[in-house]
Amino acid sequence: MTGDDIVARIKAAYPDAEVTTDGADCSFSATVTSSAFEGLSMIKRQQPLLALFKEEIASGELHALSLVAKTPAEIEASS
């Protein structure tokens, strides 16, 4: 799995998302910004994102995926 694969899968589920990835081989981190996360706790944001990669994590194709999920307002406030 590549960083581009991760971005494509997340964008398919969250079309408005801005996604950046870092990593290689089977260990990646991703930052996902989407209005879909409004009003959700961090865990409620990450659960559906991780579910997108359940099979790859279970098989070991994707060993580690660290996620940061924020709303556009949170990104703007931190700028």
Image: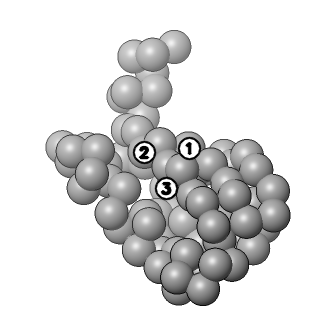
Q: Name the residue located 43 percent from the left edge and 45 percent from the top edge.
A: 69
Q: Amino acid at mark 1?
A: Thr
Contact (Cβ within 8 Å) of mark 3 with mark 2: no
Q: Is residue 11 visible?
A: no
Query: At numbered mark 2, what does the secondary structure look like: helix, strand or loop?
Result: strand
Read off the residue under disc 3: 16
- Amino acid at the residue labelled 3: Asp
Alpha carbon distance from label 1 to label 3 = 13 Å
SS class of the residue under badge 3? Answer: loop
Label annotation for residue 31: 1
**Vertically, is 19 above or below 48?**
above
What residue lies at 45% left-to-right and 21% top-to-bottom? 76
Circle 1/circle 2 CB separation < 8 Å: yes
Q: Earlier in the sequence, mark 1 or mark 2?
A: 1
Q: Marks 1 and 2, Cα distance to the nearest angstrom?
A: 6 Å
Q: Which image quarter holds the N terminus?
A: bottom right
Residue contact at pointers 1 and 3, CB within 8 angstroms: no
Q: Which residue is mark 2?
A: 69
